[in-house]
Image (spheres, coloured by chain):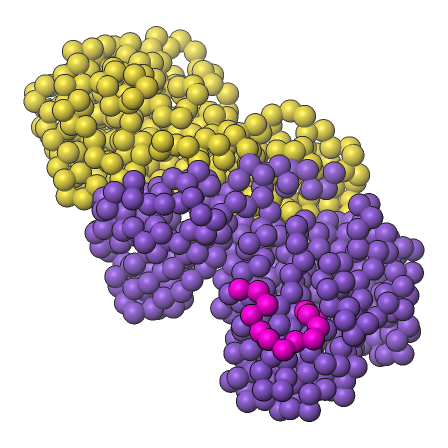
Chain colours: A yellow, B purple
Amino acid sequence: MTNNQAVNIEGIGVTAAKGFRAAGVTAGIKASGTPDLALVVNEGPSNAAAGVFTSNRVKAAPVLWSEQVVKGGRISAVVLNSGGANACTGPLGFQDTHATAEKVAAELALNAGEVAVASTGLIGVRLPMDILLPGVEQAAKALAADGGEAAAIAIKTTDTVHKTAQVTKNGWTVGGMAKGAGMLAPGLATMLVVLTTDADVTAEGLDAALRGATNTTFDRIDSDGCMSTNDTVLLLASGASEVVPQQDEFAAAVATVCADLARQLIGDAEGASKDIRIDVTGAATEQEAVQVARVISRNNLLKCALHGEDPNWGRVLAAIGTTDAAFDPDQLNVAINGVWVCQDGSVGESRDLVDMTGREIVITADLRAGESAATVWTNDLTADYVHENSAYST
Amino acid sequence: MTNNQAVNIEGIGVTAAKGFRAAGVTAGIKASGTPDLALVVNEGPSNAAAGVFTSNRVKAAPVLWSEQVVKGGRISAVVLNSGGANACTGPLGFQDTHATAEKVAAELALNAGEVAVASTGLIGVRLPMDILLPGVEQAAKALAADGGEAAAIAIKTTDTVHKTAQVTKNGWTVGGMAKGAGMLAPGLATMLVVLTTDADVTAEGLDAALRGATNTTFDRIDSDGCMSTNDTVLLLASGASEVVPQQDEFAAAVATVCADLARQLIGDAEGASKDIRIDVTGAATEQEAVQVARVISRNNLLKCALHGEDPNWGRVLAAIGTTDAAFDPDQLNVAINGVWVCQDGSVGESRDLVDMTGREIVITADLRAGESAATVWTNDLTADYVHENSAYST
């Protein structure tokens, strides 16, 4: 999962594929004065689309809106704002989302029912519509075939870098952008992501590819165990390449872009100093492998230890022991960065052999109960995370 | 839940009740040179006992041992060490626990099968038996009818204060001691706790009282969501008062002592600066109330916000939304320190009205879906927690 691994690409992110224009502007929603409004427009000829959303039952107004849009299988434009999540804002908040979609539709002569909306920022605060709607006009004027980077910049919140990825295959391209630095935990999807492709794929084909990809990428990064109210991942097809790809090949390309973006999200998680890959092997089922990896990824004590470069494998076992996955405690093997510090549930190789000075740490837990495996990515828990999240709304 | 609320008590903690002697000594297991070995002896005439243990499937050797002892319904002595958990130490670790019980039995002319063992400290390291066994001799010599405080001191790890409580009723007393500052999360029981009583109660009566009490006290404190491999709560009866109490009254007294100790544990959680009481009301069932309170208590983002004295109710709703409890997102009400900052799932009273300067914070979440309620206690997440737990084993 390295960035920019594809070649022969003219644009980046959501404008890597043909048939899309994008913009990112400073509407003034954020007090910081940084870009805060992005617009992505699909110029067709197709406007097939798919989306996955947070499984949180407390859903932001833009999620409720965009879920309806996606049900129609068509998206002509996506408008995204940072600076406010428009979550827990009641019927008036939903009206704000609706008004935003209508404004985009009016500016671009589209059907508002095909305009998806995504928002990110503080929960429980109404959006400043008097600022946001003029921002939509501004963004519509700024739309450009190379606007992918500006759009990616405008959706940042606590992200320190903007995130884009793209892959080109046999005459078609999949690209995308993502934001997310906290509240990274699974629930169908996570964070705000817009993917675009110029391949000619039906809404059903997009949906299958997107669900398959998110299941093993965005759903398997878990920075802090907290699930957002606003998570949205959209995939838009323009068909502008006039190529109908093989579904398998297309799905693989979508998965590659999602994996790339997911890795970037983990690499920029709030306050993190370590990116931690948890490989669970020898599980009876993939579901149990994911369960065990997830519970390890959420263990605050372990995450603190890893921050301190302490190969505290006892905390890995204590975490595994809280699951109902198939394993024998006396058979568990755990490696940290390749050193099997726990063998047969007890002391293994010397912890002194473990080099944890790098940013990436790999924990391997072999349950020795089957043939299934899964990987979940997480981060360490740091004082910077605490500082960042104790002062977020002030 | 305030400490020392009972009157007319001569001793404290495990020696508040008649028929017990205790000691706490410095065996030298801890590098710090602070007391690290405690012994509690029941001098009868009864030695009925009950216990509850961690539900973690990775259980420390002393837990495996003491579970067997408790099955017999009789405990004559409990030996506890800090400075090492003796968890994930394999068959040799179990032999160490066995040898410790045998040593206590030999010193005091007891049956080793009636000697419970409890350990706390780092996982995955063998205990220094050449130091521990002489410590048992030392402790046996130091046993005293007023040794409750010394014993409570000797079981501390990262605890900043020792914890004792006691209640006297109609001619009988229940007292106890506890240690625990991290890994405070439920699973039948939590942390190391020894309770004693001079009431004359059968093992079955003790078991019922203990399970009822832990279910609503130790099981409902959740400092960091991490479950230990060593959690042990024991209740020993000497019968020395020669009073057979009413079961209800006895159970209430045990619950009072457990609640007192539980509150002390939360008040001394690692690095915490806030004690947070989460009251969930209006739940369809008590189980759902506990589920919702638990998920709120484990939300790192919320715990950071509370540390920063930020009444970030959006994070409460985002947490509630991850449960499958009965509620309508548009009906949720949330108060922080009595101010209903969220009403009908949306913005309520002004967050500026919330005073969070005190150590104790009360979050009330009214699901408006039924008549059941539950309370879970937790702490804020602080940079001090990170520091303490990133350097624990070094």
Residue B97 visible? The answer is yes
Which residue appears farthest toward the front when viewing the image?
Answer: B8
Residue A217: horizontal and vertical position, in percent?
44, 34
Q: Along the horizontal axis of the image, is B262 left or right of A92?
A: right
Residue plotted at (89% across, 69% down):
B141
Q: Considering depth in this image, is A313 or B318 the residue closer to the camera?
A: B318
Dominant secondary-structure state across the stretch colored magenta? loop
The quadrant of the picture occupied by the C terminus of chain A is top left
Residue A371: horizontal and vertical position, in percent?
59, 48
Is B54 placed above or below B295 here? Answer: below
Is B80 placed above or below A65 here? Answer: below
Residue A333: horizontal and vertical position, in percent?
70, 47
Residue B65 visible? The answer is no
Q: Which residues are magenta?
A: B2-14
Q: Quadrant of residue B69?
A: bottom right
Is B313 placed above or below A22 here? Answer: below
Residue plotted at (84% across, 79% down):
B111
Residue B107: horizontal and vertical position, in percent?
91, 72
Q: Considering depth in this image, is A374 or A123 the residue closer to the camera?
A: A123
In the rendered image, residue B10 lying in the magenta stretch gets the answer: yes
Residue plotted at (40% across, 21% down):
A163
